[in-house]
Amino acid sequence: MLPALTALLVFQLTGEVLVLLTALPVPGPVIGMLLLVLSLSARGELPVALRDTANGMLQHLSLLFVPAGVGVMVHYARIANELPAIVVCVVASTVLTIAATASVMKALMPRGDA
Amino acid sequence: MMPPRIADIWVYLSASPLLGLTITLVAYQGAYWLYRRSGFNPLVNPVAIAVAALVLALRVTDTPYAQYFEGAQFVHFLLGPATVALAVPLYAQWHRLRAAWRPLLAALFTGSLVAIGSALALGRLLGVSDTTLYALAPKSVTAPIAMGIAEKIGGIPSLTAVLVILTGISGAALAKWVLDALRIGDHAVRGFAVGVASHGIGTARAFQVSEQAGAFAGLGMGLNGVLTAAMLPLLFALARSW
């Protein structure tokens, strides 16, 4: 687990440094993710320890959003009177986005691949 | 020696990061227990329940958010390595990704534009303030990217984080019904749509359904993050020059 965790942090750090050097408009961890995919496909196999650590982490991905979500208490006063409009807007827009993305992808997917 | 009074214990605990960290984990485990008891009903979203319980607890004890975050930041920090860890399921689905890159890109562009366009149009229609509108535009993108975009286009980053999480919860809670109504059975398509529309929280939900759905959701989240980060500041610059 320790080597796998170290590898994840090294890739994240590399991503962050690249973003700082190139002023890319993308967060470091996303670049780190892309670099790790590339290095895995160059290597041609997935180390078991990395697979287990990553899957363990991703199983509880939801937990990691909780601290930022609690930040709603800071903004509650600002958005209180707009709250119904915001909720309608977010929910409707999310449903539309899921429907549009899935419909386009389904229509274009090669038959027999699914 | 006198035993310490409750108030003294509280003063000590509330100044240490241990309490914020512990209540975050306890609230999430409790919320997850409820979610499991409900038979994984997507409406019983563990993030929403944990957040509501924590906000209530902080309000009741009169604890400021910044003080809570001293402890909770250790959980928050793991978002970075967890984003990198998404590479693992992505790599596991590599052959399907390569076979389907054309439909993926077309769906990505459509989804990204619908997410931004419908949020702005509906927000305008419902009369929300400009500040909120700018914070709404990048709502479908994972929080760290969305906060950076909001800053660029004149929104408030921490308000954006809250709207991003609301979007994630909506997607995780409603995706099943939307996708069932459209008769979409392929887990690659289902996952990708959820990831594009509702980022990491949607992706977390997709991983509970299947590894394939999760991998494609992670891909959708990553790609939409990159695309929106590149596109939205340009769109706003264009709109303002009119």
Image (spheres, helix red, strand yellow):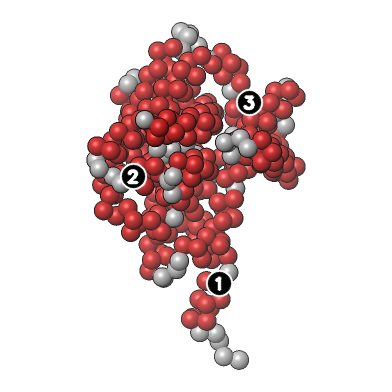
Rendering coords of residue B28 (x, y %): 47, 53
- Give the label, 3 or 2, closer to the camera: 2
- Give the label, 2 or 1, closer to the camera: 2
* Count of numbered marks: 3
Residue assigned mark 2: B130
Are the residues tagged 2 and 1 within 8 Å (C-beta)?
A: no
* Type of amino acid under label 2: Asp
Residue B15, labelled with which disc?
1
Camera-side residue: B100 or B143? B143
Residue B126, labelled with which disc?
none
Camera-side residue: A104 or B94? A104
**In the rendered image, which quarter is residue B62 located in?**
bottom left
Q: Residue furthest front?
A: B241
Rendering coords of residue B224 (x, y %): 49, 30
Question: Secondary structure under badge 3?
Answer: helix
| Quadrant (top left/top right/bottom left/bottom right) for the N terminus of chain B | bottom right
Is residue B5 visible to the viewer in this orientation of the structure? yes
Question: Counting other residues with Cα less than 10 Å from the Cα at mark 3, is it few (<14), some (14-19), or many (20 or more)?
Answer: many
Dot 3 or dot 2, earlier in sequence: 3
* Type of amino acid under label 1: Ala
Q: Chain of mark 3?
A: B
Camera-side residue: A44 or A30? A30
* Type of amino acid under label 3: Tyr
Residue assigned mark 3: B91
| Quadrant (top left/top right/bottom left/bottom right) for the C terminus of chain B | top left
Task: Identify which residue is drawn at 59% across, 23% down.
Answer: B93
- Give a yes or no on whether discs 1 and 3 share a subunit: yes
Rendering coords of residue B162 (x, y %): 42, 48
Is residue B84 visible to the viewer in this orientation of the structure? no
> Residue B227, relative to residue B155: is it above or below?
above
